[in-house]
Image: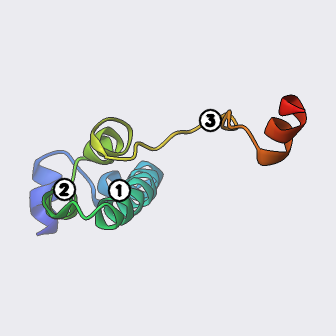
């Protein structure tokens, strides 16, 4: 088997370098978030697709930020809602 790698000009260390490790961790984080969110939203087809298709985090990012029912928001502002105490003081 090692001869096949050498014939193609690759060595075993080319496949398992630090870039592969970083890509694996990147993909694992986004896949975990996307699977968790699709399960919470009861989106079974998305869950199966995200589980079976490996796209290095691209499909997972698209699901989380574009297709999910409740989209993931990186930066949020506090909601503008009136509280009971502020509405009572204005009416008096």
Task: Report the front residue among 24 and 50.
Answer: 50
Specify the label residue 45 is tagged with. Answer: none
**What percent of the width, then of the height, locates residue 76?**
63, 36
Can residue 16 be seen?
Answer: no
Point out the tag, 1 or 2, that comes first from the N-terminus.
Answer: 1
SS of the residue under disc 3: loop
- Write the residue at 17% across / 54% down: 6
Numbered label attached to residue 75: 3
Compared to residue 4, the image places residue 86 above or below, namely: above
Q: Around disc 3, counting alpha carbons within 10 Å, would you say few (fewer than 14), some (14 to 19), or many (20 or more)?
A: few
Q: Is residue 10 above or below residue 66?
A: below
Q: Is residue 10 above or below residue 80?
A: below
The reply to whether discs 2 and 3 touch (Cβ–Cβ < 8 Å) is no
Measure the C-alpha gap from mark 1 to mark 2: 9 Å
Q: Quadrant of the C terminus?
A: top right
Percent across and percent down for residue 24 are 38, 58
User: Which percent across, then down, holds residue 72?
Assistant: 46, 44
Q: CA distance from mark 3 to mark 1?
A: 18 Å
Q: Is label 1 in a helix, a strand or a loop? A: helix
Q: Is residue 46 visible?
A: yes
CB atoms at circles 1 and 2 under 8 Å apart?
Answer: yes
- Please tell me which residue is depicted at 72% across the width and 37% down the height of the picture: 82
- The residue labelled by disc 2 is 46
């Amino acid at each position: 088997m090692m001869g096949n790698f050498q014939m193609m000009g690759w060595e075993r260390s080319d496949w398992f370098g630090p870039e592969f490790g970083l890509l694996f961790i990147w993909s694992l984080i986004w896949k975990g978030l996307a699977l968790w969110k699709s399960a919470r939203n009861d989106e079974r087809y998305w869950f199966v697709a995200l589980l079976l298709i490996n796209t290095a985090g691209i499909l997972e990012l698209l699901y989380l930020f574009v297709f999910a029912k409740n989209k993931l928001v990186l930066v949020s502002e506090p909601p503008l809602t009136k509280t009971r105490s502020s509405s009572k003081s204005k009416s008096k």
